[in-house]
Image (cartoon, rainbow, N blue to C red):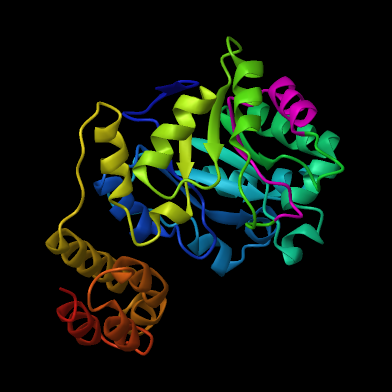
Amino acid sequence: MTIGPLSFNSTFFLAPLAGYTDAPFRQVAHEWGAAAAVSEMVSAEGLARDSANTEALLKRYAEDEALIVQLFAPDVDPVMRCLDKLMKHEPVMIDLNCGCPVPKVVKTGAGSALMKTPEKMHEIVSFLVKESGLPVSVKFRLGWDASSINFISFAACAADAGASMLTLHARTRSQGYSGNADWSQIKVLADMMKGSGVRVFASGDVFTADDAIAVMRQTGCDGVMIARGAMGNPFIFKEAGLLTNGARWEPSLQDVKATMSHHLDLMIDSFGERIACREMRKHAVHYVKGRPGAVKAKGLINNAASRQDYEEALSLLA
């Protein structure tokens, strides 16, 4: 699949997840078949102001040759001020977040608040397309709430601004992550963009490889952004890739244990053992979820402070 001048070996991407898609997690997802992995949400204002915490979100793993950065901003001003600093990190694509429903983001006018101000989104995308020379994508929702569904006009506005890719999370902002994603609306968008050259990606309620295949077949979208379905389950990318051709595969217990240990080691290399062991807890509980011995393992994980603590937790899985 191609997006602008970029080529990808599959249609399944790791979606941006605040607090999760750091360099170690993106590396693990890539190793298990993700065609691309998008960074955590990066504040354009924070980057413009030389925030060390913001800059850290742009760290890439050693083999990361295709860094895709997701930016959030309320208008074009901080994007203009941060672009030179962003380009020093040599991203291959920039994604504009117009879907985050979190109050602290929305109250600034960024995230899904941009669904209310499509003219500001248009200005940001136009600027990025012209000044970065990179493909620009836009991730958005059905609308602010059930009474203001405007994804069709919003998508048309983004395409007019020069966006190469559109990702629709098929819920409204007011739904947050509750209820069900309405995949039928992704089909509406995919049909609308057919023949335009703009790629359409699906997002929402893709928790298994079967879900990933189903949403593509039901909607005719070009690709899938997998978010919560990849938490503790980077194997979903290999599963979905094989299932595209009708082949079934699932990770063994050894695959799970080895991958979780590898993930932890990557985090230790990036952040040091103390911080890594604290941050790994949110990933580890998903790795062990639903497996025999998971309850006792989670008890250890919730207080894990060393690599040995995690090894003991993994030893409880059967």
When the figure is inspected, residue 132 is found, relative to residue 26, above or below; the finding is above
Give the residue displayed 52% in from the left and 46% down from the top: 69
Using the rendered view, name the quadrant where residue 265 is placed.
Answer: bottom left
Where residue 108 sits: x, y (%)? 81, 59
Q: For this view, does 294 lie left or right of residue 226?
A: left
Using the rendered view, name the quadrant where residue 185 is placed.
Answer: top right
> Which of 145/210 is in front?
210
In the image, is residue 165 part of the stretch drawn in magenta?
yes
Using the rendered view, name the quadrant where residue 23 is placed.
Answer: bottom left
Q: For this view, does 198 lie left or right of residue 62?
A: right
Which quadrant does the N terminus fall into? Answer: top left
Q: For this view, does 132 lie left or right of residue 311?
A: right
Q: For this view, does 127 lie left or right of residue 226?
A: right
- Residue 301 visible in the current orientation: yes
Give the residue displayed 64% in from the left and 41% down from the top: 170
Which quadrant does the C terminus fall into? Answer: bottom left
When the figure is inspected, residue 171 is found, relative to residue 270, above or below; the finding is above
> Which of 185/44 is in front?
185
In the image, is residue 132 part of the stretch drawn in magenta?
no
Q: Which residue is farthest left?
A: 254
Residue interval drawn in magenta: 151-175
When the figure is inspected, residue 246 is found, relative to residue 85, above or below; the finding is above
